[in-house]
Image (tube, grey):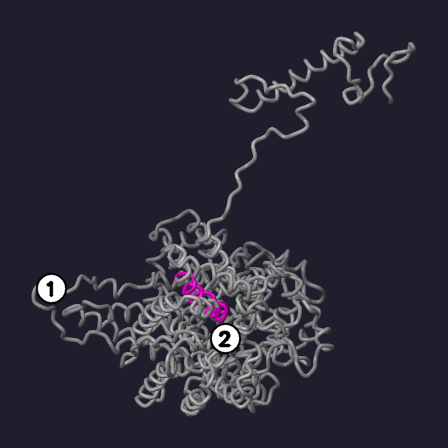
Amino acid sequence: MDFDPKWPRTGKSTSPPSNIYLELPRKPFLELPPHYILFILFSTMADYDRRNQSRGDRGDRGDRGGRKRRYRDDDDFDRRPQRRRYEEPLFAVVRRQLLTIAESAARRVEDDIQGIAKSVTDNYDDEEIRRDFVNISLDLVHEQPMKIPFIAGTVLVAHSLKPELGSEIITKAAGALQKYIDTGAWREVKLLIRFLGILQPLFEGDGIFPLLEELFARAVDLQTASSEDLLGLELVKIIQFTLPYVMLSPASGFEAQANGLLEKTDIIATTPHALVDLVNTFCPEETQSAAGQSVISLMQSQLQKEASNGWELKCLPRPWKDLRDPETDEFKSFDSVTKVAFPEITVPNPVPNGPRPLFPEVYLSVYADQEVDTVPATDDISSSLIRDALVDTINLLDFNRVATAKFLIDIDCYFTPYTFVKRATPFDRMRDLAGEVQPWKPEDVAVDAVFSQLFQLPTAEHKLVYYHSVLTECCKIAPAAIAPSLGRAIRFLYNNIDTMDLELSQRFLDWFAHHLSNFGFTWKWSEWTEDLDLTAIHPKIAFINGALDKEIRLSFAQRIKGTLPEPYPKLITSGKEKDTPEFKYASDMAPYAKEGQELMQLIRKKATDEEIEPVISAIEEQAKSQGVEDPKIPSTDAFVTSICFVGSKSLSHVLSCIDRSKDRLLAIGAESKHARTQIITSVMDYWVDQPGIAINIIDKLLNYTILSPLSVLEWALVESVAAGTILSKPHVFEMISATVGKVTNRMRQIVAARTQPGLYEPQLTAIDETLSREREDMQTLFKYIEDSIVSIAAGSNDEQMERGDGTGDLPEDAIIRQWGRRWLRVFRRKVAVEEAFISDALTNATPLGTEAPAGATDGDLDIADADADVQ
């Protein structure tokens, strides 16, 4: 609407135009028409009231009156005060750049290296900047091994600009290295030596090679003293994984020293250790072709191949190669830098074992049998170098699974640009990329590394659930990339389940169920439908049944049943869907039904032992009259079944019932060996559809010492062996492993008490007697397992020979013998590991007969602590 000074000129609307404030003529206010003046006055007053009210709504500021009225001329500029511009302090900038070095593919890491080095050297006198640079650099070496080449590159540039700074960080690294050598922290030793190895051009003479020679000399001494030594193998491994980084460095002319060391390490690295077969992922006796090589023998052959190729090391980054001198714009050379002497490092003799147990390592890849290579082949040194960096990252960052997963997803940032294909590249696309130079899938390489630690034998370095959670976080961060890789890994492991080490197949089962629980229990079960026609004791059927059982433990039967395609739902029986199993004595047709119902009611009413005794006696009298050989068995069955039924609501309920009946249960076990195993039978029969609950109750009965570890073995391996078919049930292996674990854990607690410093007589003798007694009990337990299973593995078990015509030619007989061999392998490894642990731990223990020195106490150890049970 255009402004008309004669408005309103008709009898139509008298409202002023909507844009009146913009269209007011520039003339004195009082010369405007009266209706304009009134409109402006009332509008201004309303606007004033509204603004004042809005200020009053802002808390206590409303009492200060209204804001100053703004006029049209005020709109020409903003009267609000500008926020003071914040400049990040230089030390914070340097710290952030150093902590995030190489993490982004969008920035050139060479620019970051030069920028960090220049900032620190230009401000060398700033103690905070200098201190942060030194400390953070060494922290990154210890915690984020994949960044070591970039940190070392930064130190190289900083040293070229300010030799004092380079000398300071080398001195501090040497001090840390000496401390780690003295304490036997061999992973940290390896990483620091790797860091110093890349700094080889800064050192005078042979630099790091004299230290590597000294480590090799100690390894020779250890191997000479004992062919079963493992510490010497660890020292050889440190040398092997240092050499590529020394040859990677800008230093040149050290090929002769490297080749000389390789010739020396060959005899140790290529000699197989006695434990290698026992820690192999796949049973060599089942399939020699699938058995993996030890890491050091594999690395030895890879190093020799790389040396013959001129140390190409195509996967390792060399960020210093593309650095340019800012003054001359030429490529930076480190030949003319100020040289420093290599710090003096002493390797003690004897070399300390350290806190982390050492065992031979076997190289495992779950992507080995693919038609297209998505991970480095085992004859390529990249497979070992990338795996080593990833494994150290995973195990060092166990305090932050999210950060670990992020590093795994970003693996392509820390190696050369053409090492990996683009993230989330489909597997089918990899066929098109196959050629002379084959890039690898970063997701497969990362998942491979996690599985290598999850399946580490004899034990993983951290709790298994940590590795579960790392894989889960990886899926959350990059589901489209990780999920297909995990799918192919699962198929590989499932297809090789029958030759895999039994303990590892159990770990695979636990991870599989746990992983599915985090993602709606979805899996392509239809891929395995044909395997449902296999015999009930086949390893694949055992895996499927075990996985469904674990899923039900993590959820409930109805939900799991709803996630399964046909014909899998039939595997979940109606009994598994019941929260409370039926009480067998509820039927009047059951033997001892009346007494069983009465017992149940008494237990529910928390009756005393005196009230329960007549019912127990009545069952035993009735059993005697029927000719039962041991009347304690039916009475025990009725009593324990009643406890299970009354306590079926929750674990706390059943524990309360067991606690009230503890004395009677202890008496049952003491009076009759068969009645003691009947306790286990009753529990397992009642919870037959939910074996996880039964195993939990058995575990609690062991803690109460109502059951002994040997009684659990007797029940599983003798009374319920069923011609060896019981060995195919995952929950039975789980129960036996947990029982043996209680014994070995107690043994280790006593060993720790015996080896603690400051012990003198008479405490030494008391603990040593306890140790000898418990060690003998442990050996008896392992011998019982060996004697029980060896006949099954050989097919000479009495029940096996009675099957069919006794020839052992039934289709299931070969599978049963295979189960026996797999069980034997697991427990032979366990006994070897425990005996080695005890022998190594007692090597430096205080000798018996040592008296307290004059004026010193004779130790405050409570003998009960050493003899305390695991409960």
Eye-nearest disc, 2 or 1:
2
Q: Name the residue nearer the viewer: 314 or 496.
A: 314
In the image: residue 759, left or right of residue 97? left
Where is residue 160, by image quadrant? bottom left
Where is residue 324, by image quadrant? bottom right
Using the numbered discs, state the Cα–Cα distance from disc 2 to disc 1 in whole angstroms.
62 Å
Where's residue 770, x and y in %? 24, 71
In the rendered image, residue 401 lying in the magenta stretch gets the answer no
Question: Is residue 612 in view?
Answer: yes
Residue extent of the magenta highlight: 135-153
Dot 1 amino acid type: Ala
The quadrant the C terminus occupies is bottom left
As drawn, 313 above or below 153? below
Dot 2 amino acid type: Ser
Where is residue 26, by image quadrant? top right
Mark 1, residue position: 856
Where's residue 696, x and y in %? 45, 61
In the image: residue 347, left or right of residue 157? left
Looking at the rendered structure, which numbered label has been put on residue 603?
none
What type of secondary structure mainly makes up the magenta span? helix
Mark 2, residue position: 333
